[in-house]
Structure formats: structure tokens, C-alpha cells
Image: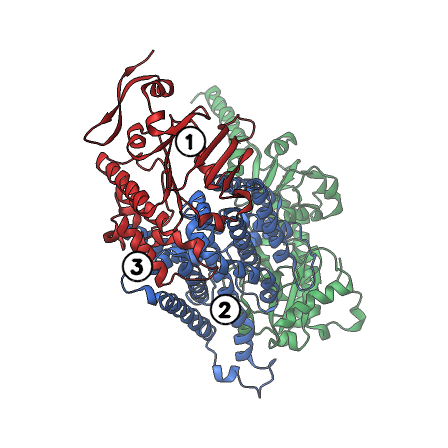
């Protein structure tokens, strides 16, 4: 469905942030882009959302390369939840969420009842309906992130790309978001690609992992196959136990010590 | 007190006096002038040869063009001035710091302040005295006074039209209009020439009236004073035509809008007499019979 | 704080109605101000006499005051006020900063340089109905905009707001230095006239300059009309706007061009009148929320009323002396703005 074919990217002469990366995202999958800071996972995500143009290689949606699609068309298929959102003005939660309707509206068209319905449903799905009239800037970190996810949902796309969705959140909110994403994937069949450095989040949520370091893909495959102690050692120089946790119901990574 | 002690005291006193007032009573032999109209006054009283430096804007009389330039109000070149070794520097009244600088160096300073015709005459006398040309100074003042009196006599008893004396505006448009107010030498000139200043009630040297103000005050004569030479007929016509915007104003309706060109019209110095006569000829043309059509004396 | 166009409970059907009501309300305010302002001034005029056709126009002083002295002035004030306020809104969205003004990117400094060059070197070049100072200030404004645009534009990519801001600040500083230098070379009267121009002046006298500015102002407003929703998305972030389907580069170019045209036209017509471009958008946002689809038209209309009102004060408060309108906007706008900020925090 969404595929990156040997894409490379870099700014000017300062070397490549991403080299020769190829990933195929299967419909309905929950894929994690995993790796330390600077490994190129955010760059890959931006290439897949069309925000950046690859220096070489191409990204394809269905059968069409992204360069053949207008921003509007692409926005109807792929939505992005960025790591941080800082609006310059004090929009209300409803106004923020309705922004996701932009690719579905004509140039001078105002939101209609259908659009408000989609927004309302998205707020309900993310548990933020009670915040609808609030000023976005006054919300907590977890609430803000859920609102941004809601606005991505109003875009009504098959694919959702998320950049470090739980990075700045408290433990409770991390679990909330993880549960929300799992549910959305399960109930609505939304294909998701998640860039994260949180090994346990990736382990709990994703069924497919793409492991990256220094701008290259080290390995990719089913989570159980890719996420091993050897891989953690290779990525982080850390000795860790990777085990299936009975109560949690998924693999967990427990770091034990630093390796020289 | 012993005679020798008295003599000592006298010598010390004389030394002190000569140090404290270095140029007191002495003629200034090397004069630098930052004020163009005062330079003109110096030349008029015959002190031209004593002038060693002039401002950037000096151009009258022609002799000044050959003299070294030392800057002006905003950018006086103090180094250059010092290098000319002056014993008198003419500065603007607002250049206080400059004054102190020269005073510290023991150089005499004359601070010129802009005001009415009376002030012009006083300045002529002051600088003439400083340059050791007191008699010439009195002569120039007498000549100027008689010129002005002559003009007054010519127009005496005639009705005085309400006149707007414009001293600046944007090119090609009726915006940024500057006119003479109720004080200053231009106001005085108008008075001598037999006109009533439209803004006599505003006690400032210049006023910026809006279109509304000009329409309401309805001047009977509009005179624009402009430096430099008169342009070609087409350009002149175009600039005059700008005033047609104020159609209800008597000056426009009766075709009494005059654009006068000449540096002497805006110079607060010895040429004021000529300026007054030019203004009077425009305000009261019938007071100057054909025989005098040769124009004002230089 | 009121929500924008998008109200929530029960408001869905009323979205169109709310937008229409707000715009109509501000429109009525602007219209009323423009109709009343010519009637008020330092001289009392009789409206009946002004419109009395039986008196020849050239003899009718009341008509002269109304149609020559006041009407063009009020129309200029409305046009300039609308242009500056709208440009301010667009600039604030483009630069993602509520403190941006129409003058942030150097347009007015360029215009000032153009004007001061003409005033100091006594140029008399006229092109048809355009007189030298407005012509030169427009030229200066356009040159400044072109330089900033060239510095900030990156082919195929969105403009970086950081680079845009830095380019504008640098240009402002550089042109300001040039202006000081030219002033240094100028004489008394020229400096005086420059300073007077910088304080703003709406007294155009004829409809000519207003009509002449339309080829700039109308396209600018046409661009303003299509920008609002994109500006909403852009002000949340360039990347997130892009992923929501906004052509960010095109939106930025349109915003920059329209704001520059509107500001350039306003400044060449009336000089750089400050505070309108920052106070009006903020006041309007406090009243109607932050949705640009409401804020942009409301600001344009309120800006027109605001500047006409300030000019009214300028020409009556110390009659017969006229205070320059830029001084009035600063004295009214500044403290009011401070009060609003204090109240909010």
C-alpha cells in the first residue's frame, strides 16, 4: 500500500540522513520504526508523508509515486501525528480537530453537519469529547496528544503516521495512547506507522518492526523475529533481556547493563 | 603697598585678563562660518577676505565657492575647522556642544539664532563689529532699512490681501504644504510688502495646513517661494496647476497664485530688501509703474 | 474567549450564520464611520449646502470642504486602515507570531528610503498622475519585498519562517542605516519634510491617488480572500499544514505577496502609519476568536473604521492644529494594547 523504494535524503552537502531505505507497509499493519536518536526514523516518516522529497528513490502510494499526487489527494490517504504541535494562536479543541477536514472541503466551503459529526466521533474515540470547547493550549500533554490524534482521525485516512506519539507523556498517558492506537487499528483497520525509540512501546503495539541506525535499516520483520537481545545490543550497546511477559501479553525489553 | 608689588599685581591682572578674554576687543581675522546667511552678511560688510571657511551650503556671494567647506548644522567638521586656525566661528544657536568645544580651545564663538527682520539687522551689526567693520555694518543696515522703508511707502494705504506664503511642499501634489506662520523674517517681509499673513495668528515660524484649513481660511493671494532657477514654462504651469484643486479659494479663482524662484527670497540676510520688493511687486503690481519695470536692484 | 466559526453544541447549522453576522456587523461599523466622519471636523459645514446643486461647485465652500478636504481623506483612511489591518493578520499567520506587523519584513523601511531619497535630492520625476514621493516610496517598498523574498525563498521547498524573519530584520536594519545617512546629507527643510512624511498623512485632496492604488490593493484583497483557512492550518505548523493538504509554499508566497502589495500601497499613499497592523488584529481576535476566516475580513473592516476614527481625532482634538495621524494611532493604540495584555495575564 505505502512503500518506500530505496529512498535517500540529506540536506545539501552535509551527508545523508537516510541512505537506501526500502520499506513496504502492509494494509492494516502496525509498523514501528525503531532506533536511537538520529537514526533517520523521523526522516523516513517525513519522506513517507511527502513532507520531504527523497534525493534518490521514491515513495509509492498504491501504484502512484507521491510526486504524482497533489498535497490534497495525499492528505486524504495519509495523516500525520507530529511529535509536537505548537499553534501560534489559541485555537479551541474543536477548531484544532476540524482542521483535519481541510482536504475534504472546497476552497470556500465551510464545515457542514457531516464534518462536525466526523469531528465529534473522533473526539469520542480519543476520549476528549468533554474538552471540545476548551482552549487547546490549556490542556495537559496527554490531552493535547489525544486531540492531535483526533484531528488526524477526522482526516479519515487509511494510513496514520505517528512521530514519537508518547515521547513526552507520563506513564499513564503512554498506556492510554498505546491502548487507543491498538484499538483504532483493530476496530477501524487504520494502517499505522510509528516512529519511536521506546522499545517497550514498539514491542507492545507493533506487529512489524523496522530497526534503524545511522541512516540505514538494519533489519525489518515481525516483531518477535526482529526484537532480540542481540538486536538491542547492536542498536544501543546495552545488555538487555527480551522476554515475553505473561501478564502484559507481549514482549518486553529489560535493560540490564551497559556494554563497553 | 610697595611700588614693585603694585606693578606685579598689575602685570598678573593684565595676564589674567588677556587669558580669560583672548579675543575681547580684537578684530577677528580668520572667520569660519557655518551659517550661510551670516557668511553673506560678512561679505556684504566687506569682511570677505577675513572669511577662511564656509558651510557646505554656502553659495552666495560667488567668492564663497572657492573657500574650504567645513560641514553644516548636523555634520560640522570640527577637525577641519580647527585646521583653519580661526579666531571666530559662527555657529547655530542650537549647536551648544560645538560652542563649548571652541570655548575650551579659546576660540571665540558667535551663536546665530533665527528670528525676524530685526534680528537680521542686529546680526549684521554684531558680525560687522566682530570683524572690525562696524562702520560698514551700520551702512549695510541703513541701506537695508531704507530699502524696506521704500517698499513700505510704495504700498502704503493700499488694501492688504490675505496672503498665504508657501515655503515648501511635495513636488507635483498638494501635500506636505509648509507655510510661513506669524513669526520670523518671512512673516516680516510679507508685512513690509503689504500683505496680511494668513496664519498671523499662529505664533510659529512654519505651519502645515491641511486642505481643509486652506479652504476655510481662503487666501486671496498664494505665493510660493522656491530656491533655484525658474523651470521651463511647461513645468512651471504644471506646478501652478496643482493649486486648482482648491477651486473655491479666491487666490485660485482670481488667478493670483504666484511661484517665485530665487535663493534671495529665502535668505535672511542683506538681500531681504530685494526680496521685499519682489513680493510687493506681486502683491501690488499697480504700485510699480512701467518706468520701474527694470526690476529690483541687486 | 469565544470560539471562532466552528461553534460546538447546536452551532453546526449556525456556522454560516455566525460568519455572516460578524462580517455584517463590522461592515456596518465601517460604513457608519465612513459616512459620519466627513460630517465632522474643525469647521462646521452644512450638509444641505454641500449637496446644493444650485450653487456652482467652485463657489460652494461647504461642498469644497466635504468633497475635496474630507471625502478623499476618509476614503483613504478606510482603504489604508483595511489594508494595514489585513496585512497585519496575514503577516502574523505567515510568521507564526502574534507580534508581527505589516512592517516586520522591511516594506515600510523600503518605502521610507524611497521617499527620503526623492525628498532629499528634490527629484521631480512624475509619471502621469503619480507624483514623485508616492511613486518612489512604492518603488522602495517593492524593492525591499523583492530582496526579502529572494533571500527567503527556496525552490521546491517551503520558506523557513526563521529565515524570513531574519531577512526582514536585516533589511530593516540596513535600510534604516541608509535612511539615517541620507538624512545626514539633507538640509533643514528636507529633514523636516521627511520626518513629517514618516508620521503619516491621509490628506490626499483628490481621488486620483486612491484610484491609482487600486491596481495594487484589489489583487491583494483578492488574495486575502482565498487565504484564511490555509492560514489557520499554517499557523499550527508548516509540516502539519502540508500533511493536511495545504500547498505550503504557495500559501506562503500568496501571503507574502498580498501583504507586501497591500502594505506597499498603503504606505505610498499615506506614509507608514503604525499600530493599525498590530492593534486591530489583536482587538478583533479578542472579540471573535482566532479563526482567520472571521479574523481577516473583520480586521479589514475594523481597521478601516479604526483609522478613520483616529484621523477624526487627529484633525479635531487640537483644532486648528492637526496632529499627524500616525501619532494618534500610536497614542490610542499603544496604551489600549498594553491594557488588554495586562488584563489577559
* Residue B93 makes an appearance in the image: yes
Q: Extreme bottom residue here?
A: C54
Residue at numbered disc 2? C74
* Residue B280 makes an appearance in the image: no
Neighbor class of circle 2 (other Cα within 10 Å; few <14, some 14-19, many 20+) is many
Q: Residue drawn 41% across and 38% down?
A: A26
In this picture, residue C324 sits left or right of residue C193: left
Task: Name chain C's colour.
Answer: blue
The earlier-in-sequence mark between 2 and 3 is 3
Question: Mark number for residue B46?
Answer: none
Residue at numbered disc 1? A41
Q: Which of label 3 and label 1 is nearer to you?
A: 1
Q: Extreme top residue here?
A: A260
Mark-to-mark CA distance, 2 and 3: 32 Å
As helix, strand or loop, the secondary structure at mark 2 comes to helix
In this picture, residue B16 sits left or right of residue A131: right
Letter of the chain shown green in the rendering: B
Check the picture and name the quadrant holding the N terminus of chain C. bottom left
| Quarter-of-image position of residue C197 | bottom right
C186, above or below C40, in the image: above
| Quarter-of-image position of residue B196 | bottom right
Question: Mark number for residue C2?
Answer: 3
B272, above or below A40, in the image: below
As helix, strand or loop, the secondary structure at mark 1 comes to helix
Residue C98 drawn at (x, y percent):
40, 49
- The foreground one among C342 and C152 is C152
Task: Name chain A's colour.
Answer: red
Amino acid at each position: 500500500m505505502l512503500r518506500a523504494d530505496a529512498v535517500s535524503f540529506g540536506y545539501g552537502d552535509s551527508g545523508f540522513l537516510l541512505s537506501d531505505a526500502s520499506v513496504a507497509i502492509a494494509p492494516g499493519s502496525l509498523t514501528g520504526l525503531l532506533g536511537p536518536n538520529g537514526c533517520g526514523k523521523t526522516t523516513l516518516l517525513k519522506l513517507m508523508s511527502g513532507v520531504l522529497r527523497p534525493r534518490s528513490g521514491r515513495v509509492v502510494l498504491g501504484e502512484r509515486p507521491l510526486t504524482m499526487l497533489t498535497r490534497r489527494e495525499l492528505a486524504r490517504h495519509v495523516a500525520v501525528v507530529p511529535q509536537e504541535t505548537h499553534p501560534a494562536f489559541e485555537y479551541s479543541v474543536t477548531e484544532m480537530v476540524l482542521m483535519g477536514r481541510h482536504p475534504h472541503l472546497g476552497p470556500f466551503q465551510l464545515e457542514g453537519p457531516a464534518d462536525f459529526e466526523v469531528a465529534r466521533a473522533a473526539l469520542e474515540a480519543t476520549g476528549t469529547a468533554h474538552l471540545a470547547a476548551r482552549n487547546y493550549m490549556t490542556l495537559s500533554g496527554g490531552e493535547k496528544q489525544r486531540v492531535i490524534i483526533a484531528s488526524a482521525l477526522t482526516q479519515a485516512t487509511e494510513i496514520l503516521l505517528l512521530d514519537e506519539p508518547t515521547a513526552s507523556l507520563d506513564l499513564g498517558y503512554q498506556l492510554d495512547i498505546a491502548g487507543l492506537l491498538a484499538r483504532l487499528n483493530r476496530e477501524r483497520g487504520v494502517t499505522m506507522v510509528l516512529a519511536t525509540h521506546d522499545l517497550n512501546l514498539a514491542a507492545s503495539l507493533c506487529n512489524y518492526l523496522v530497526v534503524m541506525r545511522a541512516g540505514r535499516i538494519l533489519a525489518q520483520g515481525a516483531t518477535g523475529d526482529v526484537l532480540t537481545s542481540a538486536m538491542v545490543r547492536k542498536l544501543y550497546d546495552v545488555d538487555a533481556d527480551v522476554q515475553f511477559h505473561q501478564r502484559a501479553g507481549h514482549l518486553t525489553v529489560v535493560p540490564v547493563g551497559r556494554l563497553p | 603697598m610697595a611700588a614693585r608689588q603694585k606693578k606685579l599685581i598689575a602685570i598678573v591682572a593684565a595676564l589674567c585678563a588677556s587669558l580669560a578674554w583672548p579675543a575681547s576687543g580684537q578684530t577677528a581675522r580668520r572667520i569660519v562660518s557655518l551659517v550661510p546667511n551670516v557668511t553673506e552678511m560678512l561679505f556684504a560688510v566687506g569682511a570677505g577676505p577675513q572669511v577662511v571657511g564656509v558651510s557646505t551650503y554656502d553659495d552666495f556671494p560667488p567668492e564663497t565657492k572657492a573657500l574650504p567647506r567645513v560641514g553644516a548644522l548636523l555634520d560640522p567638521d570640527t577637525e577641519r575647522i580647527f585646521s583653519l586656525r580661526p579666531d571666530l566661528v559662527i555657529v547655530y544657536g542650537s549647536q551648544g556642544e560645538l560652542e563649548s568645544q571652541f570655548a575650551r580651545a579659546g576660540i571665540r564663538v558667535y551663536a546665530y539664532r533665527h528670528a525676524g527682520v530685526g534680528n537680521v539687522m542686529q546680526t549684521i551689526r554684531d558680525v560687522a563689529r566682530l570683524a572690525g567693520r562696524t562702520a560698514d555694518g551700520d551702512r549695510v543696515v541703513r541701506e537695508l532699512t531704507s530699502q524696506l522703508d521704500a517698499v513700505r511707502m510704495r504700498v502704503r494705504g493700499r488694501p492688504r490681501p490675505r496672503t498665504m506664503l508657501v515655503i515648501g511642499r511635495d513636488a507635483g501634489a498638494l501635500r506636505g504644504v509648509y507655510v510661513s506662520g506669524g513669526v520670523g523674517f518671512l512673516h516680516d517681509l510679507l508685512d513690509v510688502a503689504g500683505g496680511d499673513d494668513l496664519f498671523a495668528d499662529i505664533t510659529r515660524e512654519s505651519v502645515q495646513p491641511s486642505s481643509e484649513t486652506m479652504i476655510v481660511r481662503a487666501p486671496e493671494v498664494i505665493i510660493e517661494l522656491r530656491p533655484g532657477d525658474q523651470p521651463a514654462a511647461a513645468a512651471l504651469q504644471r506646478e501652478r496647476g496643482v493649486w486648482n484643486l482648491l477651486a473655491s479659494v479666491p487666490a485660485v479663482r482670481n488667478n493670483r497664485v504666484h511661484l517665485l524662484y530665487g535663493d534671495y527670497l529665502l535668505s535672511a540676510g542683506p538681500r531681504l530688501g530685494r526680496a521685499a520688493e519682489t513680493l510687493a511687486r506681486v502683491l501690488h503690481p499697480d504700485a510699480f509703474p512701467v518706468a520701474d519695470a527694470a526690476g529690483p536692484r541687486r | 474567549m469565544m470560539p471562532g466559526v466552528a461553534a460546538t453544541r447546536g452551532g453546526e447549522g449556525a456556522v454560516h450564520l455566525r460568519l455572516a453576522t460578524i462580517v455584517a456587523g463590522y461592515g456596518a461599523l465601517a460604513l457608519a464611520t465612513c459616512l459620519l466622519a466627513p460630517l465632522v471636523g474643525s469647521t462646521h459645514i452644512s450638509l444641505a449646502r454641500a449637496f446644493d446643486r444650485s450653487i456652482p461647485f467652485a463657489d460652494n465652500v461647504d461642498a469644497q470642504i466635504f468633497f475635496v478636504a474630507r471625502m478623499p481623506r476618509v476614503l483613504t483612511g478606510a482603504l489604508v486602515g483595511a489594508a494595514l489591518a489585513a496585512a497585519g493578520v496575514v503577516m502574523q499567520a505567515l510568521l507564526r507570531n502574534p507580534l508581527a506587523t505589516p512592517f516586520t519584513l522591511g516594506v515600510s523601511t523600503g518605502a521610507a528610503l524611497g521617499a527620503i531619497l526623492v525628498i532629499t535630492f528634490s527629484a521631480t520625476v512624475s509619471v502621469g498622475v503619480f507624483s514623485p514621493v508616492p511613486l518612489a516610496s512604492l518603488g522602495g517598498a517593492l524593492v525591499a519585498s523583492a530582496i526579502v523574498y529572494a533571500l527567503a525563498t527556496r525552490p521546491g521547498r517551503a520558506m523557513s519562517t526563521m529565515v524570513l524573519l531574519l531577512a526582514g530584520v536585516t533589511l530593516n536594519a540596513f535600510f534604516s542605516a541608509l535612511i539615517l545617512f541620507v538624512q545626514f546629507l539633507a538640509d533643514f527643510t528636507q529633514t523636516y519634510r521627511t520626518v513629517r512624511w514618516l508620521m503619516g498623512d491621509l490628506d490626499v485632496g483628490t481621488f486620483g491617488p486612491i484610484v491609482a492604488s487600486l491596481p495594487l490593493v484589489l489583487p491583494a484583497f483578492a488574495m486575502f480572500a482565498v487565504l484564511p483557512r490555509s492560514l489557520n492550518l499554517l499557523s499550527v505548523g508548516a509540516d502539519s499544514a502540508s500533511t493536511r493538504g495545504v500547498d505550503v509554499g504557495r500559501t506562503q508566497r500568496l501571503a507574502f505577496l498580498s501583504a507586501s502589495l497591500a502594505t506597499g500601497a498603503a504606505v505610498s499613499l499615506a506614509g507608514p502609519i503604525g499600530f493599525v497592523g498590530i492593534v486591530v488584529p489583536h482587538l478583533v481576535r479578542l472579540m471573535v476568536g482566532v479563526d482567520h476566516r472571521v479574523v481577516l475580513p473583520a480586521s479589514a473592516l475594523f481597521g478601516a473604521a479604526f483609522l478613520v476614527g483616529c484621523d477624526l481625532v487627529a484633525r479635531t482634538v487640537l483644532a486648528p492644529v492637526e496632529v499627524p495621524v500616525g501619532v494618534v494611532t500610536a497614542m490610542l493604540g499603544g496604551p489600549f494594547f498594553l491594557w488588554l495584555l495586562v488584563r489577559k495575564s
